[in-house]
Image (cartoon, grey):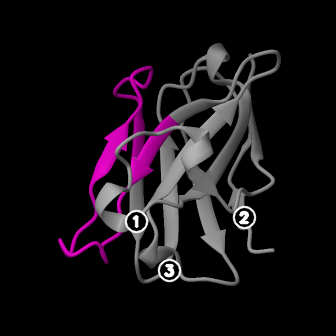
Amino acid sequence: QVQLVESGGGLVQPGQSLRLSCAASQFTLKYYAIGWFRQAPGKEREGLSCISSPSDGTGSSKAFYGDSVKDRFTTSRDSAKDTVYLEINNLKFEDTAIYYCAADRRPLEFSCSSIRGEEFGSWGQGTQVTVSS
């Protein structure tokens, strides 16, 4: 089963930054829109961002963010490394969660039209982010 692999999580203090990475070993990420999600203990999974594929006919990637995401989150894509990133700045205690990336299963012309988990597949195992002083 094809899965994505997240990395870059860890234990950080409030106010610090982290950059999470998402990669795949068995398919090429650049052909897919990639979403980032998180799930905190006792809470529902939350859609954070989606970055479109440069193969969708536009030749470039566009980033979209969930309603709950403020300016602190930035998703980007490195085509040369075939990796998608999620940078989180000014980390807060409430950012503590497991962070996942997943591939948008919709046709490219509809990708990132919403950031709902049921529209995504090839989920990774997640990377833990813990914000603690």
Identify residue type, mark 3: Lys
Residue identifier under label 1: 107
Between 125 and 57, the one nearer to me in the picture: 57
- Residue at the location (34% across, 45% down)? 113
**Nearer to the camera, 109 or 89:** 109
* Dot placed on the residue nearer the N-terminal end, 3 or 2: 2
> Where in the figure is residue 66, as x and y percent of width and height?
41, 30
| Quarter of the view holding residue 30 | bottom left
Q: Which residue is mark 3?
A: 81
Choose mark 1 or mark 2, whichever is in front.
1
Q: Residue furthest left?
A: 58
User: What is the quadrant of residue 44 in the picture?
Assistant: top right
* Left or right for 38, reference 110: right
For the residues labelled 1 and 2, the Cα–Cα distance comes to 22 Å
Amino acid at circle 1: Pro
Foreground of the two, 14 or 130? 130
Q: Nearer the viewer, mark 3 or mark 1?
A: 1
First in sequence, mark 1 or 2: give its number.
Answer: 2
Between the C-alphas of marks 3 and 2, the distance is 14 Å
In terms of secondary structure, what is the magenta stretch mainly?
loop
Residue 47: percent from the left, percent from the top? 53, 34
Q: Quadrant of residue 124?
A: bottom right
Q: Name the residue: 73% across, 29% down.
A: 97
Residue 5 image label: 2
Q: Where is 41 relative to 130, above or below?
A: above
User: Which stretch did the figure color magenta?
Assistant: 48-74
Q: Is residue 20 above or below residue 65?
A: below
Kindly state the secondary structure of the residue where label 3 is placed: loop
